[in-house]
Amino acid sequence: MVWSHSALAAMRSAVRPAGLPKSIVSHATEGCADGARGRDSGPESVWTALRLGAERIGHGIRAVDDPALMRHLRDENIPLEICISSNVATGAVPSLSAHPVRQLYDAGVPITLK
């Protein structure tokens, strides 16, 4: 099931008063290397997830395209969950050698590998 960011925001607002866990993990849409995937791809999808209160970002490798976003992730210790083989298989990156995981790591962005 895919939920829009607005639906997630509404659910988060509804559960907070009930005292349910506030931890949010959001999967930021990964655009294909040729830009063919959804309109929410790119760094803006990560920023949107953060505005919704995400404390961890699933995927989100396009954060590499926004230096301010990489600094924010680093400074706030918000990790990206990265699956390199999935990114290559789905076309989010054109090849293993083109994957930005090293750039993210070198920028100090917390990452976990799946």
Image (tube, rainbow, N blue to C red):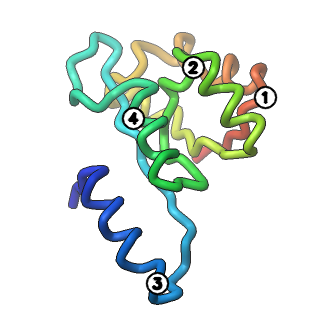
SS at circle 1:
loop
Q: Name the residue under label 3.
A: 17
Q: Is residue 7 left or right of residue 60?
A: left
For the residue marked with disc 4, what is the amino acid? Ser
Q: Name the residue under label 1.
A: 108
- In depth, the one of 105 and 53 nearer the eye is 53
Q: Nearer the viewer, mark 3 or mark 2?
A: 3
For the residue marked with disc 3, what is the amino acid? Pro
SS at circle 4:
helix
Q: How far apart are marks 3 and 1 (CA)?
A: 35 Å
Q: Where 56 sits versus 108, above or below?
A: below
Q: Nearer the viewer, mark 4 or mark 2?
A: 4
Q: In the current view of this chain or complex, which residue is farthest to the bottom?
A: 18
Q: Name the residue under label 2.
A: 64
Which mark sits nearer the N-terminus, 4 or 3?
3
Q: Which of marks 4 and 3 is in front?
A: 3
For the residue marked with disc 1, what is the amino acid? Gly
Tell me the residue at 78%/28% (across/down). 108
